[in-house]
Image (cartoon, grey):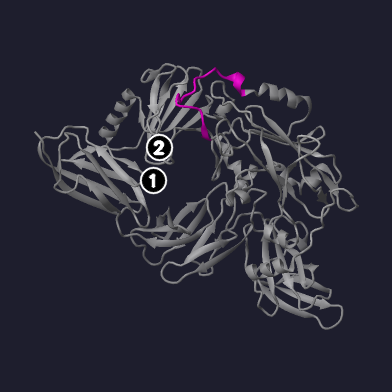
Amino acid sequence: MKFSQITGKFFVALLLLCNSSAAFADYLWPLPFGNELTSIFGDYRTRRYHVGIDMRTGGEIGKTVVAPEDGYVMRVRTGYFGYGKVIYYKLADGNTCIFAHLSAFAPDLEEFIQQRQIASESYNQDIELSPDKFPYKRGQTIGFSGATGVGAPHLHFEFRTPDNVPVNPLTVKGFEVPDNSAPVFRNLRLIGFGNDELARALGWNFSYAFRKSPKSADYVLTVNLPCGLDDYWLSAEIVDKVGKSISNKPIYDVEVRCLDRVLYHLRYDKVPFDDTYLIDAQRNFAMAQTGNQEFYNLVNVHNARTMSGICEMVGQDPPPIEIIASDAAGNSSKAIVRIYDSTHSTKDGKFAVPKPDTIKLNNLLEKYGDIDGRHPAAFIPGGDKMYLLVKATTSKAAKVTVHSKGSESSVELNQVAGKFYLGVVDRIFGKSPGERMALRDSVYVVIEPAVGESKSFTVPTTYSRLLDDTGKFVPLISDDRRFTVEFPADTNAMLPLDDNYYYKLNRSGIGKFPNYSLEPSATALTKQVTYTYSIGDSIPKGVGLYSVGGKGLYYLGGMIDSVKKTITAKSYVLATITARQDTIPPNIRQLRPAANAVVTSARPKVSFRFSDELSGVSDNIDIRIDGKWCIPVYDPESGEVTAVSHFDLSRGKHKLEIKVADKTGNVRRMSTEFTRGGK
């Protein structure tokens, strides 16, 4: 994936060299059924990019999948989750195609895998194969589409280079899709304020709609954006239609230019697996959390870390900024954004100066602090900065200073509206003493009016720093010392446009296992945080850590330390965490053949559904007829398990034994008998 700033003739030459289609053979489309796509390369997934294309199969299972070129099956996997049944197919030119969610492999390969499953008594297989084991010619059937793993019926297809780098299939000859629709610019969003709620309360409008210019085919805004009022970057909502698809798809290329300068360039031609975490830097994380995954942040990670905003990059009164968006078929659109210096008047497109909203400021006090107290004040986290908002008793101007307990450092707050005063009282990367206040137990505030007596009061510190003064990540510890959160000590652990370095660790609930939660919780992470929960004198069997959400409890796992009496789990999500003990095994229902049933087939189909109320079902499923293992096929979405014996049953009674388990090791066993009848 290209994510670079390139200028001049070198950029033009590079575009010519990077025509991916010219680098590969003219392959055969792998699904003769059709070429309508439900998802494409670069689609947003949680913490990663979608690195293939999903082909629609009309909601049906069993559509023929063919080899795009001569080659062989180099690897085959079967599993209940993820890709389900998947083929890794090595092409004669060294590239690899991946076919996932298959219902079945080609007959010879299917029989081979089943024999391996039977021999190992395990459905899960991951087998590497030699070139002479399962070779196929161009156009030969290698499998059949399905819905194994996750998702509705479809074919997931990937194209990878010899060094295992995913390539956008729509740029490869034979895998292109006819497309005449150019990308559409919808909205522009200002980003990088640190705390959007605070910025809104201070009067900032984040979103501006694009419209088609009456004088050209370009997209434009109805206002010009200011420099000099605050720092921000740009994020553009851009959508595209691909071929016959009716849903919006990601674009292929976006470039930001100012005259001959390339300010930003992103192209979805290749995505190395090591770079997939960048999705939450290149797409707007905050908007993705609301369900809108089509905002592209128009700044790279380096510039977002080292520069204050777009105005620093282009200057106060730059020429118009151009945003060019293209799809893989070569259709493109352009948007124009104009920026002006707010320190002098601009007649056309004058931007309304942000005006603080006292109602929203009151709401911030209520959310983050104590609005009903004698001296309302609130610490408000803002990325790498900590703000303090204070509400005085009168709107008359006063000098309001904040002093650190046990330190001589102080910060003067600014009057932003009436009774409200605001200022940065601590900055993670601050250099001056006033920017690095010692946020220990509390700070005290002094209000000095122009006339009358001064007042002072203490504000308890409710947030903790994630980094100490040396830049080292420090664990966050709950007030009862039973719960700890450790962030990964890595510079990539925080993404610069959505970083959070100040957190409040809350405790709620009563009983043996309280709940713990972090504020703010919406944080983009590139690595997992570690949760450690102190259980007590003894750790009961079946205990694990769970996240608490709208759909109930989700099992995170649990590594037990019997010496420290703790249980640990990792997660990419800052959720409300609790511990629970699971002692109840999964439930089995709708078993067929039922107890004492009569079947006529020599190879009867066994089916049942099972579920678990707490930790969830595991892939430890065992089905036996007369002690002989049968291949269990599990659909995690329906909860149904099926198995057909690979051996003939004699007439008479037969014993059916089933064993399933949950994720904490609780096992449910069921044993019944049925009769094979008939003549």
Magenta segment, which residues?
20-38
Residue 301, placed above or below residue 377: above
Q: Residue 377: name its quadrant.
A: bottom right
Q: Quick one: 138 or 116, which is closer to the camera?
A: 138
The location of residue 467, given as percent across then percent down, is 64, 57
- Residue 588: say if magenta: no
Q: Which residue lies furthest to the bottom in this view?
A: 453
- Residue ID at (51%, 54%): 530
Q: Residue at label 1?
A: 637
Distance between mark 2 and mark 1 Cα atoms: 10 Å
Q: Residue at label 2?
A: 147
Instruction: Give left or right: position of 381 versus 160.
Output: right
- Residue ID at (66%, 54%): 471
- Residue ID at (59%, 55%): 522
The secondary element bearing badge 2 is classed as: loop
Which class describes the residues within 10 Å of circle 2: few (<14), some (14-19), or many (20+)? Answer: many
The location of residue 546, given as percent across then percent down, is 44, 58
Q: Which residue lies furthest to the front in this view?
A: 214
The location of residue 168, given as percent across then percent down, is 57, 29
Instruction: Give left or right: position of 59 versus 235.
Output: left
Residue 379, placed above or below residue 374: above
Tell me which numbered mark, 2 or 1, is placed earlier along the sequence.
Answer: 2
Q: Give the amino acid at mark 2.
A: Ala
